[in-house]
Image: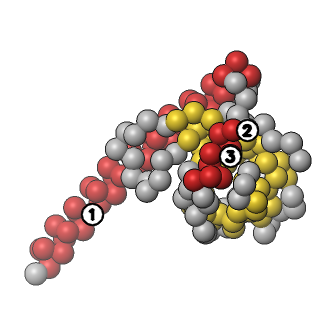
Amino acid sequence: MSLRAQLDTEPDKGERRSASRRKLRLEVEGVSASTSQTQVVIHDLSEEGLLVESPIDLVAGELLEVVIPEAGTAQAEVAWSSGRFFGCKFTQSVSTAAVSAALLRSPSENQKAPNAEVVEKALIELEALSFAIRRVTKAVDQAIDRLNQKKD
């Protein structure tokens, strides 16, 4: 099986994840309970999880198996989705060596994928959406707290 990848360091932006993410483009085999084997693209990888692009629709809670260099087949649970993009958390963390192995399989910057700009824009939009969701969640929590205080 051949693997092609592009990997960049993601700067720390007050990230709430427990592990540093690395941006990449790694084409691997993926399998879920609802589909047969298919080619997926990993765009973001850490020891704890990944952002995957799949031509197959996946749902939150669904388990996805992907082949990670040096880790072999890793199982991850879909946490969220946006179009063809799915945020997943590994059921068992992968090693730092596996993340590094993905780095070693990265093509040079001038071999960047043709749709890299589209993916970068999607990631920016997902970050903005994540911020908005946290803000709304905080407002809802505060409203619930105020309602609970009125009951007392």
Amino acid bearing label 2: Arg
Task: Count neighbours of disc 1 (C-alpha within 10 A) and say few if under 14, some if 14 to 19, many if 20 or more.
Answer: few
Q: Quadrant of the C terminus?
A: bottom left
Q: Is residue 30 left or right of residue 138?
A: right
Q: Are marks 2 and 3 in contact (CB under 8 Å)?
A: yes
Judged left or right of residue 37, residue 115 is: left
Nearest-to-viewer mark from 1 and 2? 2
Q: Which residue is mark 3?
A: 101
Distance between mark 2 and mark 3 Cα atoms: 6 Å
Q: Nearer the viewer, residue 3 or 84?
A: 3
Taking the image as shown, residue 105 lies to the left or right of residue 1, namely left
* Residue 80 visible in this rendered orientation of the protein: no
Q: Which residue is mark 1?
A: 141
Residue 36 lies in what quarter of the image? Answer: bottom right
Q: Residue at x 82, y 52 (%)?
A: 29
Helix or strand or loop: what does disc 3 sit on? helix
Residues packed near mark 3 inside 10 Å, few (<14), some (14 to 19) or many (20 plus): some
**So how many labels did they put on this image?**
3
- Residue 14 rendering spot, x and y as whole percentages: 34, 44
Q: Amino acid at mark 1?
A: Asp
Q: Amino acid at mark 3?
A: Ala
Residue at the far bottom in the pictured view:
152
Q: Give the camera-side residue of 110 and 139.
A: 110
Residue at horizontal 68 percent and vertical 46 percent from the top: 101
Disc ID at residue 45: none
Taking the image as drawn, is residue 5 in sight? Answer: yes
In the structure shown, which secondary structural element does the residue marked by tag 1 occupy? helix
Sequence-wise, the earlier of marks 1 and 2 is: 2
Residue topped by disc 2: 105
Residue at image coords 74%, 51%: 69
